[in-house]
Amino acid sequence: MKSKLVQIIESFSYVGLEIGLFVASIGFLLAIVFSPSLSEKQFRPGLLLSLAGLFFVLVFTSFSLGHIVFSSNNSPIYLFQGLFVLTKKAILYKQAITIGAILLTLHLWSMKYSLPTEFFVLFLATIASMFLLIMANHWLSLYVSIEFVSICSYLLVALFRQKVHAEAGIKYLLVGAISSAVMLYGISFLYGFTGQLDFTALQQLFSTNQTTWTHQVALFLSLAGLFFKLSAAPFHTYTPDVYEAIPAPIASFLAILPKIATLFVIQDILTHLAGTFVVALSVVILLSWIIGNFSALWQKNTKRMLGYSAIAQSGFILVALTTSQSSSAERAIEVYVFTYMFISINAFLLIDLLARTKNSFELDTFKGGASSNKMLGVSAVIIAIALIGLPPTIGFTGKLVVFSSIWEEYMFSGQKVHLVLLLFGLLNAAISLFYYIKIPYYLIVPESDDVQKNLSNRFLIAEWYCFSLSVFLVYLFFFPKIIYTWLLFFA
């Protein structure tokens, strides 16, 4: 017992980052409670304080945690009696989430947002809970972590006091509650089969010849909460409504950062399955592609369009997981999701800028916008090309490595399911061209029915920020070594 208590106490030294983020979140909460005069006017100082904190988190994960893991001969460090585990790969994903959070904070700052001060409480708590989710090594810690992420997300959506936000928050909560219940039901079955809740028990269960369809169903149910956070079908129904209701930067936050954490956990779970979950995962991927892409084709609201796009992108994020989990397959997953992070954040920033001229996210209101905002017109073309996955943008590199991993797996295993995924993936990438291209088309080709207004000079920094990120997407296409060096360092 004494040795267990010592190990638990020692584990706290490895989660100082998460504790610090929770303390900062509670600090903001106490400031709101004991200073009722705090209002949205204090949002920008709080934003700068959060930005400084996130830079500290990035430095801390790069040097302090990196030194700890590397000094342990790259061995996993098990925390709290195996509930959590710290690895080099976990540090990599923490860094990615931190970089994404910094970019989103810059979005809020450059667009002069003034949100309720409770935003900081939820923002920092969500990041901390995503860090815990990444380190989860046990179904119990996984469930608690993903519930923490979900609850913070529900509150972020319902934070604003309009009816549309309340409706979106309730829908988000209902779908999330169903997914959570289904997940807990599946976990109870897995516990009944194995008598254990740690992920390693899956290896024993799925490596035997006695694996049955009931085991597959139990695992699928157990992954329901993770599919919900990924906006993957059939747990996707909340996505377009939520994205349409909330401000663009918060939609951007929910569209990518929880997906990064969730992807890591799914990848970790599937390493114990020896390729026995390919068919069920393929069904989720195909449904996500079909529902996401074909629904996006008919959208006139850009936030709803990006919402359905996020469903389709979940399929592309998951597709490399159907391979044999080799180092090249892992690299393909990481390259795709990290490049998609930059593209998605820039896409939401773009539509946020375009909507400021007429206070509308409808495509029709963007007509002829490039004539008065040429910088945004160029950015729109680059972002659309990157989302489709065409050169010369890093979006092409991301899709290339994913499709290459699927082709290599098909050539190695000969399983037709991989060929089907490859062909459907290429087809859906082609379909996505018809709705992604709408934004630059409306900006450049049609003439506006009325006089287009230039964006106010107060958004000039945001315009340059968007343009710089767009140029960066092209730069990474020609110099992808930056990303590969970063990934290989934590391999």
Image: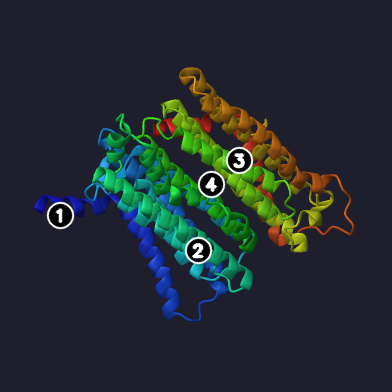
Sequence-wise, the earlier of marks 1 and 4 is: 1
User: What amino acid type should be assigned to the residue bearing mark 2?
Assistant: Leu
Look at mark 1 in the image and give the residue it sits on.
5
State how far apart marks 3 and 1 are (Cα): 48 Å
User: What amino acid type should be assigned to the residue bearing mark 1?
Assistant: Leu
Sequence-wise, the earlier of marks 4 and 2 is: 2
Sequence-wise, the earlier of marks 3 and 1 is: 1
Left or right of residue 286, residue 136 in this image: left
Look at mark 4 in the image and give the residue it sits on.
232
Left or right of residue 177, residue 428 in this image: right
x 37%, y 48%: residue: 60
User: What amino acid type should be assigned to the residue bearing mark 4?
Assistant: Ala
x 40%, y 52%: residue: 183
State how far apart marks 4 and 2 are (Cα): 16 Å
Question: Could you tell me if the residues under marks 3 and 2 are in contact, i.e. CB atoms within 8 Å?
Answer: no
Judge whether 16 appears above or below 159 on screen.
above
Q: Secondary structure at mark 4?
A: loop
User: What amino acid type should be assigned to the residue bearing mark 3?
Assistant: Trp
x 61%, y 34%: residue: 394
x 28%, y 48%: residue: 191
Sequence-wise, the earlier of marks 4 and 3 is: 4
Q: Give the position of the C terminus as an image quadrant.
A: top left
- Evaluate whether residue 483 shows in this view: yes
Of labels 3 and 1, the one closer to you: 3
Determine which of the numbered discs, if any, sits on residue 173 in the image.
2
- Evaluate whether residue 99 shows in this view: no
Which scheme is used to colour this image of the protein? rainbow
State how far apart marks 1 and 4 are (Cα): 40 Å
Look at mark 3 in the image and give the residue it sits on.
289
Question: Could you tell me if the residues under marks 4 and 2 are in contact, i.e. CB atoms within 8 Å?
Answer: no
Q: Give how far across and how far down residue 311 sits, in percent.
A: 59, 47
